[in-house]
Image (tube, grey):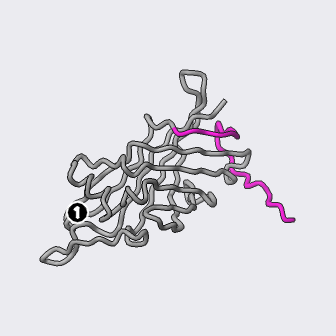
Amino acid sequence: MTTQAPSNVTIPGWAAGTWQLDPTHSEVAFSVRHMMISKVKGRFTTVSAELTTTDDPLDSKVTAEIDLSSVTTGNDQRDADLRSNNYFDVETHPKMTFTSTGVRPDGDGFALDGELSVHGVTRPVTLALELGGIGPDPWGGTRAGFTATGKINRHDFGMTFDMPLDGGGLVVGDQVAITIEAELVLDR
């Protein structure tokens, strides 16, 4: 049996334990090119996540689940299209999940590696992870804030519906930018 030495990564306020996402102070958002000239943004309003930490921050694990029917872009017709079998196919694949497989130092932040499952397809994804901070809250708890960003290609996840434009290009771009603002609370 091989054991790995601790990473010696130190983070002020770091605490081992189980952390739950505070959905009212968190956001899972995305943006994608529209008609090749602008970007449309959206978010998911029903998200849960759990972070398990140990004394070594690099041994942390996170799981997240997103209710795809909670997608909102500010346009009911577009939201219905996203829920349809053109994209998420919520009737068949109601959830998107992420399970981390590792975390490692990367520049001034970290890289969070994991498996993203959406539309019946699971693929590896790496997110750039920034720790906003850890500290006490007014209710006697401990909170941590993280920002995670990355990009995926929707075609890699079986969302291949395309509507070509007359002058070339597509109505919806292939690359989807992901931005996650997560605030988590340490379980007592």
* Numbered marks: total: 1
Q: Residue at x 20, y 75 (%)?
A: 164
Residue kind at label 1, given as amino acid type: His
Does the segment drawn in magenta span residue 5? yes
Q: Residue at x 70, y 40 (%)?
A: 16
Q: Give the answer, above or below, for where 157 lies relative to 187.
A: below
Residue found at the far right of this picture = 1
The dominant secondary structure in magenta is loop
Q: 170 left or right of 149? A: left
Q: Which residues are magenta?
A: 1-21
Percent x, y of residue 135: 58, 32
Q: 92 left or right of 42? A: right
Q: Give the answer, above or below, for where 163 lies relative to 68.
A: below
Q: Looking at the image, which is closer to me, 148 or 153?
A: 153
Q: Looking at the image, which is closer to me, 45 or 5?
A: 45
Q: Secondary structure at mark 1?
A: strand
Does the segment drawn in magenta span residue 184? no
Percent x, y of residue 131: 54, 46
Task: Report crowding for label 1: few under 14, some 14 to 19, many 20 or more residues within 10 A (C-alpha).
Answer: some
The C terminus lies in quadrant: top right
Residue found at the far left of this picture = 166
Q: Which residue is mark 1?
A: 34
Percent x, y of residue 144: 56, 38
